[in-house]
């Protein structure tokens, strides 16, 4: 059997490796439009590659009901075992799993070598334009036609076009009858109505609340990074995805810069401090000093630093794409009844979760599901 896989990032490489390990006699060809494979994978986990989250389950994802059957079939421990069978022991930081090398670059090189050793063929610099899925599957590319028995699309979404995810095939998928939900940037910084240029680059631990119509709609704790025109950091990325998924048009982002202290405890610390810069980074101290009328208001302000949501950053700064091919009537082999020999894995499907390895966990889970069906 001849298998064609479109896309050489995490889900595409995983699927190729799994199929070849299950069926050494199959011909597996991965077609990638970039000149190098795994470009987006190289950027994950700040270059360390957070490739698995051991706490992941169906409820971790916005599409909980749709992904539940896949998590019921493949528990997270089986995903970890799969990676170990790839020759990738994990370095665990809490529930976050990284390759023991703690290097995305070495991880991509390992996957590349594994593909080579298994006999997976990789064709780079080749763009797929369309496909046919009749008696024989055909990929139409800018360098000619490629015939296969089955096609697997691992083309990702639209996030970080510079790394290859440009969403160019979604119109093709629509032409073939696939329903594609609107594509929006997920897990990215938030532009605020207030200027934050004065504190750009400052990092501070905080509890973060989203407030809409006077009610708290989301809460999380983590490091907030101030940018020239807004807020960033993992906790902000998760806030942004919540805003997009729930179509929140107006809200404020309220930061408690000292969540570990009660207001009373914070006021005591302030009164014992000789200088505000002894409790805040210099840039932030200067910024806060301009916001309060008198020192008695300082503690209250630091527990309720508020910014108004303006808009999200664009796809170029997003970690994941919200939206994609809808899974309502998809099979357990991640194919559709009218094109049973065409499968989809990873971010090209309308599945996304928070920061912390959840989206790469889905890439491996979907790859396992497709490989097992072939």
Image (spheres, rainbow, N blue to C red):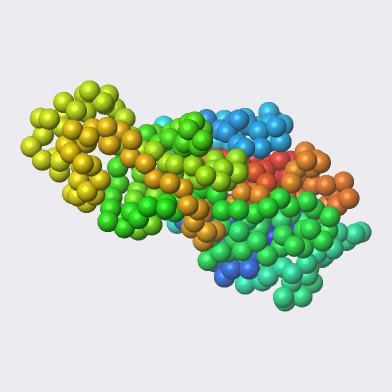
Q: For this rendering, which residue is in front, 367 or 261?
A: 261
Mark count:
0
Residue 315: quarter of image: bottom right
- Of the 4 image quadrants, the one containing the N terminus is bottom right
Specify whether residue 218 is in view: no
Q: Position of residue 263 (x, y in %)?
A: 26, 26
Which of the 4 image quarters holds residue 277?
top left
> Hey, which residue is sitting farthest front in the picture?
293
- In the picture as drawn, the residue positioned furthest to the right comes out as 135
Q: Name the residue nearer the viewer: 169 or 207.
A: 207
Residue 223, given in percent of the width and then of the height, sits at 35, 41
Q: Residue at x 30, y 33 (%)?
A: 303
| On screen, residue 188 above or below 171 | above
Residue under the point 28% across and 50% down: 202
**Residue 203, position in %: x, y?**
30, 46
Q: Residue at x 50, y 53 (%)?
A: 311
222 with respect to 169 (left or right): left
Q: Picture coordinates of residue 63 (x, y %)?
A: 66, 37
**Residue at 39% across, 45% down:** 307
Residue 231 makes an appearance in the image = yes
Q: Nearer the viewer, residue 82 or 97?
A: 97
- Farthest-out residue, bottom: 143
């Amino acid at each position: 059997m001849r298998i064609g896989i479109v896309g050489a990032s995490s889900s595409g490489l995983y699927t190729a490796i799994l199929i070849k390990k299950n069926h050494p006699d199959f011909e597996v060809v991965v077609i990638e439009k970039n000149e190098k494979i795994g470009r987006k994978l190289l950027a994950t986990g700040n270059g360390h590659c957070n490739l698995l989250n051991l706490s992941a389950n169906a409820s971790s994802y916005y599409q909980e009901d749709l992904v539940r059957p896949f998590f019921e079939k493949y528990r997270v421990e089986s995903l970890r075992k799969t990676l170990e069978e790839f020759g990738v022991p994990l370095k665990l930081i809490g529930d976050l799993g990284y390759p023991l090398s703690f290097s995305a670059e070495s991880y991509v090189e390992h996957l590349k070598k594994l593909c080579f050793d298994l006999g997976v063929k990789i064709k780079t610099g080749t763009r797929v334009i369309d496909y046919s899925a009749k008696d024989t599957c055909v990929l139409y590319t800018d360098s000619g036609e490629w015939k296969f028995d089955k096609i697997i699309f691992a083309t990702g979404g639209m996030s970080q076009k510079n790394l290859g995810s440009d969403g160019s095939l979604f119109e093709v998928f629509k032409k073939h009858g696939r329903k594609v939900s609107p594509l929006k940037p997920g897990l990215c910084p938030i532009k605020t109505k207030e200027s934050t240029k004065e504190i750009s680059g400052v990092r501070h631990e905080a509890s973060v609340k989203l407030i809409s119509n006077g009610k708290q709609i989301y809460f999380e704790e983590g490091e907030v990074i101030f940018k020239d025109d807004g807020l960033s950091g993992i906790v902000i990325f998760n806030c942004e995805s919540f805003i997009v998924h729930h179509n929140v048009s107006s809200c404020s982002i309220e930061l408690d810069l000292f969540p570990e202290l009660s207001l009373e405890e914070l006021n005591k610390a302030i009164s014992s401090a000789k200088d505000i810069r002894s409790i805040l980074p210099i840039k932030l101290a200067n910024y806060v000093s301009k916001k309060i009328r008198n020192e008695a208001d300082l503690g209250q302000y630091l527990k309720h630093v508020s910014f108004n949501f303006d808009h999200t950053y664009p796809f170029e700064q997003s970690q994941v794409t919200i939206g994609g091919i809808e899974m309502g009537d998809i099979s357990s082999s991640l194919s559709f009844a009218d094109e049973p020999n065409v499968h989809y894995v990873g971010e090209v499907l309308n599945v996304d979760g928070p920061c912390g390895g959840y989206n790469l966990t889905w890439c491996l889970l979907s790859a396992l599901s497709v490989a097992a069906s072939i």
